[in-house]
Image: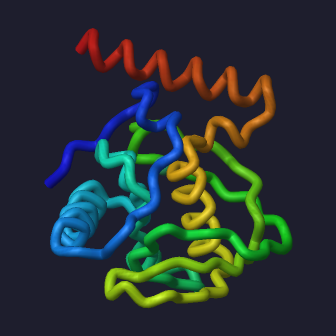
Amino acid sequence: MLEIVTFPNDILKRKTNPVKKVDAEIKEIISQMKETMYKNDGIGLAANQVNIPLSIMVIDTTSREEEHEKFQGVLINPTLVEKAGEIKFKEGCLSFPGLQVEVLRAKEVIIKAVNEFEEEVMLHLRELPAIVFQHEFDHLNGITFLDRLGGLKKRLALEKYNKSLKEKVGA
Ligand SMILES: [Zn+2]
């Protein structure tokens, strides 16, 4: 299992690099990312969250049984083709343990990526899978969910997060 990098580590603020070839090394990274996501009860993970500066995300929303829309897969070098609608959702992030914030996202996205078999895919994701995709896509671009909040909300969330970090250190 890989160690999860937590905010404010600098790697979370930097854009990741494209993957040139889906070779054995990349497949090993993907397999370890999946293991790390599942062990931490996550539904999505971006490679820079485990200290690897490459454009790879893994998503699996199938454990959220209350959601109608589900998606499970690996997306390499993803791009956002189109987005539509709006949806508000209380998001968590493995890089911000204990913090949940409500973020406004597009309700549907059409995306292009390369999968773990090095095939180009185009996908239409809706609701939770679309939200998770946008969250991880932001990570790959060095953006965290706090950057999606307005000034005051961002400051309050950051204060709450910093306070919980201090409490952990004190414990
Ligand atoms: Zn995250």
Q: Position of residue 7 (x, y in %)?
A: 44, 30
Say which residue appears at 27% left-offset and 55% top-offset: 40
What colour scheme does the image use?
rainbow
Q: How many marks?
A: 0
Rendering quarter of residue 10: top left
Q: Position of residue 36 (x, y in %)?
A: 23, 58
- Furthest-top residue in this view: 170
Say which residue appears at 39% left-offset and 64% top-offset: 19
| Quadrant in the picture for the C terminus | top left
Q: Position of residue 97 (x, y in %)?
A: 39, 38
Rendering quarter of residue 34: bottom left
Q: Is residue 13 above or below residue 122?
A: above
Q: Position of residue 121 (x, y in %)?
A: 53, 88
Q: Is residue 92 visible?
A: no
Q: Is residue 170 left or right of residue 134?
A: left
Q: Is residue 121 above or below residue 93?
A: below
Task: Give the camera-side residue of 49 and 116.
Answer: 116
Q: Is residue 101 left or right of residue 87?
A: left
Q: Is residue 83 above or below residue 1?
A: below
Task: Give the camera-side residue of 91 and 44.
Answer: 44
Q: Is residue 108 visible?
A: yes
Say which residue appears at 78% left-offset and 23% top-offset: 152
Q: Is residue 30 left or right of residue 118?
A: left
Q: Is residue 125 left or right of residue 76?
A: right
- Furthest-front residue in this view: 20
| Quadrant in the picture for the N terminus | bottom left
Say which residue appears at 35% left-offset and 15% top-offset: 167
